[in-house]
Amino acid sequence: MKRITPIFLVLFLYIHTPTATNHKPSATSVGASAFNDISISEGFLPWTLRFYNLMEKNNINIDWGNISSINVVPLKYGTQGIYSRDTKIILIQPYQIATLSTKAYNNLLLVILAHEIGHSQGFNHTSEYGVLMSRTDGGIYDVIEDNKLTEEFILAGFTP
C-alpha cells in the first residue's frame, strides 16, 4: 500500500496541474528527440533549457527517455522536488525563500531540477560534493549566489 500511494499522488498532481507544453526550442543533438518529447510546465521551461544546455556544453549524456514530464506543483512544505521512476515524472515545488536574491533563487531552482534529473539517471544521494548530496544545508546558499559555482556544483554530480 505504501508503494501505491505515491504513484496515485503523482498521477493526481499531474492531472490537476496547469497544462504543460512542448512549445520549446527544439534541441538538435544526440538524445534531443527524447528531450523534445518531455512535457514541461511553461513556467519551468527556462530552468530546464538552462540545464539541458549545461549538459550539452559539457558533453554529459542524459537519458531523457527516463523523464516524461516536468511539472511545477504545490508539495508538502520542505519538499523541493520528487522524481517518480514509475511514472517518469519530475515534480518541483518552487517556494520562495525570503532571504534569497533573485539570482540565488533562480540558481536554487536549477539545482533542485538537476537533483531530480540525477535521480532519473539512477543516481542516489551521496555524501560527495555535488547536486546529489544527501544534505545541502548551509553550503548550498554560498554556491547559489554565483552562477559559475552553481554550475560547478551541478556538474560535480554528473561527472565521474
Image (cartoon, grey):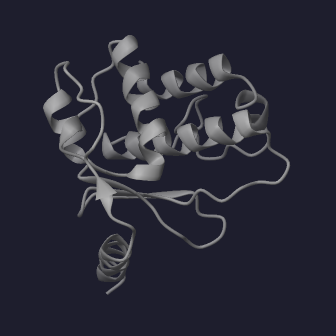
The outermost residue toward the top is 58
- Can residue 101 be seen here? yes
Quadrant position of the C terminus in the picture: top left
Coordinates of residue 67 in the picture (x, y in percent)? 26, 48
Q: 116 or 70: which is nearer to us?
A: 70
Coordinates of residue 37 in the picture (x, y in percent)? 18, 44
Q: Is residue 56 left or right of residue 109?
A: left
Q: Is residue 111 left or right of residue 85?
A: right
Quadrant position of the N terminus in the picture: bottom left
Q: Residue at x 57, y 22 (%)?
A: 151
Q: Residue at x 38, y 46 (%)?
A: 119
Q: Quadrant of residue 64?
A: top left
Q: Is residue 86 left or right of residue 40?
A: left
Q: 26 or 149: which is nearer to us?
A: 26
Residue 28 lies, with reference to residue 19, above or below; the image says above
Q: Residue at x 70, y 32 (%)?
A: 144
Q: Quadrant of residue 60?
A: top left
Q: Residue at x 23, y 52 (%)?
A: 68
Q: Quadrant of residue 79?
A: bottom right
Q: Is residue 25 left or right of residue 100?
A: left
The outermost residue toward the front is 23
Residue 61 lies, with reference to residue 77, above or below; the image says above
Q: 4 or 81: which is nearer to us?
A: 81
Coordinates of residue 148 in the picture (x, y in percent)? 64, 17
Coordinates of residue 55 in the picture (x, y in percent)? 38, 21
